[in-house]
Amino acid sequence: MGKHKTPMLDELEKGPWPSFVSDIKQQVENGKHVLKEAPDDLLGVMELSYEDRVTHWKHGGIVGVFGYGGGIIGRYCDQPTNFPGVAHFHTVRVNQPSSKYYTTKFLGDLLDLWEKHGSGLTNMHGSTGDIVFLGTTTDHLEPLFFEMTHELNQDLGGSGSNLRTPECCLGKSRCQYACYDTQEVCHQLTNEYQDELHRPAFPYKFKFKFDGCPNGCVASIARSDMSVIGTWRDDIRIDQKAVAAYVNGEIKPNAGAHSGRDWGKFDIQKEVIALCPTNCMCYDGKTLEINNRECTRCMHCLNVMPQALRVGVDQGASVLFGAKAPILEGAQMSTLTVPFIPMEPPYDELKDLIEKVWDWWMEEGKNRERLGELIQRKSFQEFLRVLELDPDPRMVDEPRSNPYIFWKEEEVEGGWTRDIEAYRAKHQR
Amino acid sequence: MTEDEARQLILETLKSKSKSKSKFYLKDFYAIVPDMKNREVKNLVNKMVMEGHLEYWSSGSTTLIGLKGMGKQHAEED
Ligand code: HEM
Ligand code: HEM
Ligand code: SF4
Ligand code: SF4
């Protein structure tokens, strides 16, 4: 039993789902954490917030570790006398390994370290993918950081006006759809941009995320300022024999997913051909054909018949910019900016693009302005000019709301101040 | 302007404003030493943090920079 009565939090344990309240209580009972009172007082201050309907956390603070300006977020409680265990309750962001693969030994070592230097409470994983350590005091930060980097060879992630911890999907480690090695590029860029990750120098946060294909398992298009999404330029590979096997019911569609109920016999016309968003497929009972020029890489047909259809072999990625959550303007998804970029180490072309974007944003961006908002303010055309890219019809979503052809004065004969008399001589009002 | 002069100017400017303001955006530092390149200013600011003249303050989402010890912490923070 904890030292605080928490009737409202206890309600949260009654539902069908695992409860974070039960987890924290478990830590109170059995944890070996050094900050003895932290989990218990966390429950207490949360219950108080439920009663008062206001937060008792103060915003931000001066915490960091030597040489780093990010990775640790200062949190202080405004009820330190009643809840001394959470008077200081700083968050530590630990850079997760690519695709979140680790051994149980490593995980155990990491958690032992955290019980030695904090509350023992974690969030596996935070939205940007980091392993999040919840709650420690300022005096524990340096020893924690030293041991983590020197003994576990493990770095902190990003926070504040930094490059945030890069994140990638499982990619080639497990997935046949991967059009490039997401883990490799995520790792390479994390190393390349250490300074941006640890030393805040941006107007605001900046995230890149790597999806190996348009299925978007890390949802890069919605969650990152720069979304790198795998794609291919040639044709979807078709194994006609396997198509026939799907049609005859020999292979389960969707790799056996959605099998919770009987959907009846697989119907390729209804379930694949008719659902292709660009209507670019046909099947005459013998041969499946795809008009690849019209295919938008929606992935539907490939997901339904993974043994029959494979992504093309001329692989790379599309790069989109500007997704963000609603803070100043509304939420927005990334906008297609580079239709195709090769994705081979050492990724020079991609780095070149990133650096042009950062230079512009660091120069022109206002304090706390995300890249997507800067593009909105300055226009997409301006963004293309900065990146030295030509407008391309594939960048246009709706011609009437984001047209992309604007003349510059030097491109118009006579400029904006041509001789109106000479013009009127030829064209009457 | 030499690095030492820039360092001096930054410290003086921050001190003179310290009554009304203790935390600054990196952009404010660019404005203090306009003839230095932004990247150089950024590197200098980071160096001054390492040397213990300045310190980072972070809300978690945004980073500000102030004179060491000037930004009030926890119990004193208003
Ligand atoms: C080279 C010649 C021309 C070019 C490049 C051009 C270009 C454009 C563009 C880019 C739009 C906007 C489309 C949109 O936002 O969906 C537009 C709209 C329009 N243009 Fe032209 N135009 C040309 C000639 C003409 C001529 C000769 C006429 C009439 C005699 C004309 C009549 C219109 C009309 C009625 C609209 C629609 C306005 C609306 O619905 O909002 N255009 N034009
Ligand atoms: C080969 C000749 C032409 C072609 C291929 C053509 C094609 C089109 C197309 C595709 C649209 C629909 C645009 C949209 O939905 O956004 C359109 C709209 C329009 N066209 Fe044409 N057009 C031609 C000639 C003309 C001529 C000669 C005129 C007038 C004298 C004209 C006046 C308009 C107007 C006013 C609209 C806009 C209707 C609206 O905004 O609702 N067009 N045209
Ligand atoms: S995003 Fe695509 S490549 Fe990456 S794991 Fe998901 S389906 Fe596979
Ligand atoms: S990937 Fe989508 S758009 Fe392309 S052929 Fe398949 S269903 Fe059609």
Image (tube, rainbow, N blue to C red):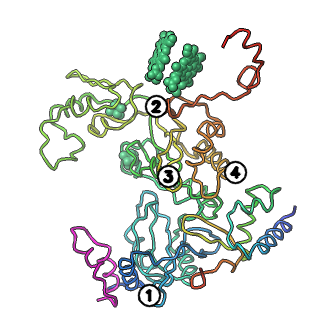
Report whether mark 4 lies on the same chain as mark 2: yes
- Position of A244 with respect to A26 (left or right) is left
- State which tag comes first along the sequence, 3 or 4: 3
Q: Residues within 10 Å of mark 4 (few under 14, many from 20)?
A: few
Separation (CA) of disc 4 from disc 2: 35 Å
User: What amino acid does circle 4 point to?
Assistant: Glu
Mark 3 chain: A
Residue A302 x %, y %: 31, 37
Q: x%, y% of residue A80?
A: 49, 87
Q: Position of residue A106 (x, y in %)?
A: 42, 71
Residue A25 falls in which quadrant of the image?
A: bottom left
Q: CA distance from mark 1 to mark 3?
A: 36 Å
Judge if badges 3 and 4 mark residues of a common chain. Answer: yes
Nearer to us of marks 1 and 2 is 1
Relative to residue A271, is residue B42 drawn left or right?
right
Label 4 resides on the chain identified as: A
Assess whether residue A11 is covered by the magenta stretch. yes
- Marked residue nearer the N-terminal end (1 or 4): 1
Disc 2, SS: loop
Instruction: Answer yes or no: disc 3 within 8 Å of ligand 3.
Output: no
- The three-letter amino acid code for the residue at tag 1 is Phe
Q: Secondary structure at mark 1?
A: loop
Residue B50 seen: no
Q: Which residue is mark 4?
A: A363
Query: Could you tell me if the residues under marks 1 and 2 are in contact, i.e. CB atoms within 8 Å?
Result: no
Mark linked to residue A83:
1
